[in-house]
Image: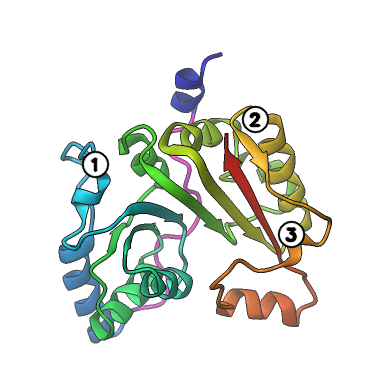
Amino acid sequence: MNAEARRSRSTEAFFGRRHGKTMSPYQAASLEAGLEKHRLDLAEMAPADLRQLFPVPVADVRLEIGFGGGEHLHHIASLHPDTGFIGVEPFVNGMARLMTSLAEKPLANLRVYDDDATRVLDWLPEASLSGIDLLYPDPWPKKKHWKRRFVSEANLDRFARVLKSGAKFRFASDIDTYVNWTLLHCRAHEAFEWQASDASDWHEPYEGWIRTRYEAKAVREGRRPAYMTFIRV
């Protein structure tokens, strides 16, 4: 089965809640205004040069899938104003938190999408991204649900298509079974090479990393985070 056929098997990769607690009027207003300003319109053809998506000059473009409350995405975009970031999060309350942060601390190098990440991946041009971050995705811990995990052969094909040669796919999780799952899938995929020089590498946070509320909870509960980096060969 070729890569195009494998991608077509999975066009809707999101499973789970899209709504949570009722938002405050301020959050709802921030969400509406923020999406109007920052949301990608996939009905339009993606520009051949993704840098055109941003109102400020950027050198390259990175993607974060499932950014939760947006703590990491807002932080890393603040640290790298010369890089364009696209964040995808279908959970409305998470998107509202990021849009509230942007209302208080605006960033011009950030675009978002509030639905399934596979739609963005299929919309993007080939070899257009310098990096993809998948940080603490839903682990779907029950074995019968493992097929719902975002790391799959079909989605790794998607990653390989949109990543430039030498670009990085970064994956972080506190769930051992998902870490092993991801390592096995990436090592079995011809487009990815695990970047690790010794056994301790995958327990070292990425440069510029901040601990999110989710990660702090995982550490308190005794789960050790793993941070893996795979290079698009």
Above or below, 105 relative to 131: below
What label sits on residue 202 in the rendered view? 3
What amino acid is labelled 1 in the image? Asp
> Which circle's residue, 2 or 1, is located before the other in the chain?
1
What amino acid is labelled 3 in the image? Trp
Q: Which residue is mark 1?
A: 49
Q: Position of residue 229 (x, y in %)?
A: 63, 51
Q: Position of residue 193 (x, y in %)?
A: 66, 38
Q: Let me know if residue 19 is in the magenta part.
A: yes
Q: Quadrant of residue 90?
A: bottom left
> Which circle's residue, 2 or 3, is located before the other in the chain?
2
Name the residue at 19% across, 78% down. Answer: 29
Name the residue at 24% across, 85% down. Answer: 26
Q: Secondary structure at mark 1?
A: loop
What amino acid is labelled 2 in the image? His
Question: How far apart are the alpha carbons under marks 1 and 3?
Answer: 33 Å
Name the residue at 18% across, 36% down. Answer: 45
Q: Quadrant of residue 149?
A: top right
Question: How far apart are the alpha carbons under marks 2 and 3?
Answer: 19 Å
Seen from the viewer's position, the closer of residues 8 and 144 is 8
Q: Position of residue 204 (x, y in %)?
A: 71, 67
Q: Which residue is mark 2?
A: 189
Q: Secondary structure at mark 3?
A: helix
Please state which of the two labelled residues, at mark 2 or mark 1, is closer to the viewer: 1
The region drawn magenta spans 10-22
Q: Let me know if residue 100 is in the magenta part.
A: no
